[in-house]
Image (tube, rainbow, N blue to C red):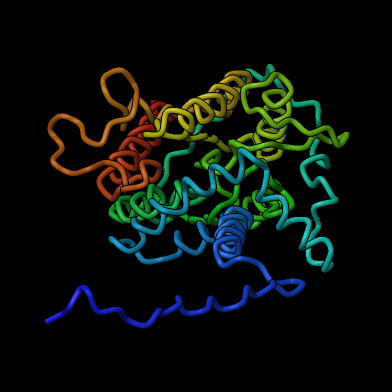
């Protein structure tokens, strides 16, 4: 047993190890982690367009939906903050970019507004089918594929589809749709053109004089985007061609939906001044009772939209394609009367 009266030798506390001074250039681990996380976030924002494009190229399915669900919000933040333009700067520095040239500026600034002659479609036959062209971004891809499948049953129609992921009219330096559309239509000679742009256009744009319009709801932005849309409409005009410009569907995210609504308003106004152009309001097809976003509609047991709340599901794309086919058949019937 321990005897409390018995003295024990004094034991001193073990010596503390000497403090180690940080060498020059060394940083605390926590600070390094913060820097690394910040760098990864910045890299994600700068490269968000490329990541969305990569995700959209995946086959339809849960994997694609998850990727888009992750990257679309990142892309929205990047475009709002303009951080995606850092990649453009890097491309310029290595000589891999033509952003210094405003390709849309080459289009005529004075549109042919006020034309009041609407082309009449000829009566197509199996031997001489009506030529259709579908062009646009990833949103039109799904509707276009549905249209091709449904139109294949009507041998009086011959349809070509051209879509480019993550493109539009806001960034002609990324993909030159105005020139591409003229080239496509010159080669294919379509009598009906179905166009759908805007899903990637709710971002800052640059005018012909270099002025930057960052806010989609600003007067300058509306005027410049309207100039681009009108110039495309005019460049595709012929005496025997109808253009159906398909509006963007309502979006689940309220902020994004407001920006898309501005785009639809601008396009509808430009179409109203041109007899050969019809604006198709997709809210009347896949929207809810109030014209807003809807995952499902009465009588349809499938989701109309993909998980990202932006793109159409196969059921939604089929619904829009059926609507477009009805419009075309109405035009054919009216011309035959």
Q: What's the residue at 69%, 72% (across, down)? A: 22
**Image quadrant where residue 59 sits:** bottom left
Task: Say whether residue 210 is left or right of residue 63.
Answer: right
* Front-most of residues 335 and 20: 20
299 or 7: nearer the eye? 7
The relative height of residue 104 versus residue 214 in the rendered view (above or below) is below
Q: Can residue 192 be seen in this view?
A: no
Q: Residue at x 54, y 35 (%)?
A: 242
* Residue 244: image location, x then y, percent: 50, 34
**Front residue (pair 87, 124):** 87
Give the percent coordinates (x, y) of residue 43. 61, 60
Percent position of residue 6, x then y: 24, 79
Residue drawn at (37%, 27%) of the image: 283
- From the viewer's perspective, tell me whether residue 324 is left or right of residue 109: left
Q: Give me the residue at 45% from left, 46% from top.
A: 139
Q: Is residue 15 above or below residue 217?
A: below
User: In this rendering, would 233 be left or right of 90?
Assistant: left
The answer to which quarter of the image holds residue 337 is: top left
Outermost residue toward the right in this view: 209
Q: Quadrant of the N terminus?
A: bottom left
């Amino acid at each position: 047993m321990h005897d409390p009266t018995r003295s024990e030798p004094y034991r001193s506390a073990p010596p503390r190890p000497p403090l180690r001074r940080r060498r020059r250039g060394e940083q605390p681990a926590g600070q390094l982690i913060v820097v690394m996380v910040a760098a990864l976030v910045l890299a994600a924002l700068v490269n968000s367009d490329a990541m969305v494009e990569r995700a959209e190229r995946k086959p339809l399915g849960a994997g694609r939906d998850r990727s888009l669900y992750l990257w679309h919000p990142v892309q929205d933040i990047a475009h709002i903050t303009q951080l995606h333009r850092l990649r453009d700067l890097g491309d310029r520095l290595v000589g891999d970019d033509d952003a210094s040239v405003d390709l849309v500026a080459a289009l005529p600034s004075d549109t042919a507004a006020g034309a009041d002659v609407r082309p009449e479609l000829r009566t197509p036959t199996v031997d001489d089918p009506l030529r259709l062209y579908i062009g646009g971004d990833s949103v039109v891809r799904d509707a276009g594929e549905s249209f091709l499948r449904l139109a294949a049953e009507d041998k009086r129609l011959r349809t070509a589809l051209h879509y480019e992921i993550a493109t539009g009219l806001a960034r002609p330096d990324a993909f030159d749709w105005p020139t591409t559309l003229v080239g496509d239509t010159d080669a294919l000679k379509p009598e009906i053109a179905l166009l759908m742009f805007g899903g990637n256009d709710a971002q800052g744009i640059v005018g012909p004089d270099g002025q930057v319009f960052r806010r989609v709801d600003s007067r300058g932005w509306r005027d410049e985007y309207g100039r681009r849309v009108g110039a495309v409409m005019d460049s595709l005009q012929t005496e025997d061609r109808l253009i159906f410009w398909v509006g963007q569907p309502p979006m689940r995210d309220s902020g994004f939906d407001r920006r898309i609504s501005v785009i639809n308003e601008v396009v509808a106004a430009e179409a109203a001044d041109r007899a050969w152009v019809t604006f198709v309001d997709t809210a009347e097809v896949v929207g809810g009772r109030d014209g807003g976003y809807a995952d499902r509609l009465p009588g349809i047991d499938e989701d109309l939209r993909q998980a990202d709340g932006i793109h159409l599901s196969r059921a939604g794309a089929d619904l829009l394609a059926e609507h477009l086919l009805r419009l075309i058949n109405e035009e054919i019937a009216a011309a035959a009367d």
